Image (cartoon, coloured by chain):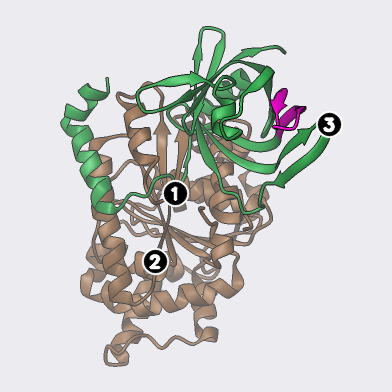
Amino acid sequence: VQKSLKSLGLKSVVIANQKGGVGKTTTALALGTGLARLGERVLLVDGDPQGNLSLFFSAASAAPGGAAHEASAPGQGGEAHGHGLCEVLKILAEGNSARGGSGYGVGEAAAKLVLADYLSTSVRPGLDLLPCLRHGLRAELGDEAIRAASPGFSALIDTARAEYDWIIVDSSPSDGALERLLLSACEAVLIPLEFQLFSIAGLEAMIRDVENCSRESGRDIHIQSLVFTKAENKVGRVETYRRLFSSFRVPIFEVCKSEYLPRSVERSRTIWEGAPSSFAARDYERIIEKAFLERP
Amino acid sequence: MKAKDSRDPKIEMTEAILNALGREDGAGGYEVSEAYAAPERRRLQGVWTVVEHRVLGAGCEEDYLESFGTRSLKGRSLRDASYDSSYSFSPGICVKHQAVEGRIDLGEGEAAYAWRIGAALAWEVGPCGTLRVRPALAYMATFLDGAPTAMRELPPEAGAFVIHYRFEGEDLVLEEEGERKRLRRTR
């Protein structure tokens, strides 16, 4: 019987797949805002240097009516703090180097300060965002610095567990040092994919990556669910895919292909604000209920 | 269709990937999108009476009631036997009744025999014509001359199981654990 993250005591979840265009950001946005809407305290981490999640919230706060959310800018204090994740990783990498590469011994108080400095708070009621506003994050930091920042970032996420009910991390379609840092920092992974061979082939690589990261970090990273996004009954062989996947060891959810998802984003609204009674919203609602909140 | 799919390299690759990653029948569970489950759920809702109940064996099948004595009464036959079964599907819950009645020869005379099961089943539409069913409450009872002789409640830890369903014209066909039932809507 599938167990929810709450019943497993897991709070930090990365939304990951090396394949692009499978709906990672849409899923992170729907789950993060959906949990906050239910009164849960949520930290969304934009781990994708494309920064689409961050763009959504900055556009949303600039949009008519968006100011109602009264979101604070990252850092609240200056330009230097405006790049969110990139700056945080820089600090963590430097901290690690200063300690001779022995890992970032971030204390709880220091971690709270770092988080407080770089978060956009209350982008929605109950929802904070660690934005990523540097497209060139990888080039700017380099793999070595990202790897050096990894222990500190894990410690930061662990610290945030005390402040939030959920930490939802969006990631980019890649399998580099940044994605491994995000994966290693989280307790669970949720994998969006499509009814397509390329996407399914990517699943194999993704699951191997999770296993490798678990081994290397010494943490058991739990594969919580697969989510078939953009699910359509008319996709060729969809019933065969469903039949094959229904015997898989990991719980699987479908979110139907829905024009309401991109339409809501275009209007700077979440699916809960733009089309709360749509099938897509109901599909995400079910994931929240069963994969996140359900009690044993 | 199945043969065609099994030769399809994409399906073969998918199968190989899933085998490599580890498969456990029904372990994870599969939630079909509400966009596709909701119409099926609506179609299933209502009261259905079982009009045919067959027991499926290896290469053969027999009528449930005709073979009831052999299977459940240690070979004793049931005279003037009758069968009544219905499923009432409402959102999230299905109430199932099944009763077999007749007269049984006990050696020292005949008695009126009745066997009944009643169950409240939580149900959800699954993928590929399946219903995922979890008993919420269920009992099975046997009566001789109206007096209960055996009563069994389903243990609370009873797990979920899968029923395959399909519509054939206006009929609903359910298949589970070597049995096939044809149901007709009464409401």
Residue at the spot 54% in from the left edge and 24% down from the top edge: B67
Q: Amino acid at mark 2?
A: Ile
Q: Mark 1: which secondary structure?
A: loop
Residue at the spot 64% in from the left edge and 42% down from the top edge: B135
Q: Is residue B103 magenta?
A: yes
Which chain is displayed in brown in the rendered image?
A
The spot of residue B108 in percent (x, y) is 74, 32
Residue A228 bears which disc, if any? none
The spot of residue B51 in percent (x, y) is 61, 13
Q: CA distance from mark 1 to mark 3?
A: 44 Å
The spot of residue A122 in percent (x, y) is 62, 59
Q: CA distance from mark 2 to mark 3?
A: 58 Å
Discs 1 and 3 share one subunit: yes
Q: Nearer the viewer, residue B185 or A209?
A: B185
Q: Amino acid at mark 1?
A: Gly
Looking at the image, do the residues carrying marks 1 and 3 touch, with CB atoms under 8 Å apart?
no
User: What colour has chain B?
Assistant: green
Q: Amino acid at mark 3?
A: Gly
Q: Which region shows up in magenta?
A: B101-117
User: According to the image, label 1 marks what residue?
Assistant: B28
Q: CA distance from mark 1 to mark 2?
A: 17 Å
User: Looking at the rendering, in which quadrant would you find the C terminus of chain B?
Assistant: top right
Discs 2 and 3 share one subunit: no
Position of residue A214 in the picture relative to residue A143 (left or right): right
Residue B146 bears which disc, if any? 3
Q: Chain of mark 2?
A: A
Q: Earlier in the sequence, mark 1 or mark 3?
A: 1
| Camera sees residue A120 | no
| Camera sees residue A103 | yes
User: According to the image, label 2 marks what residue?
Assistant: A221
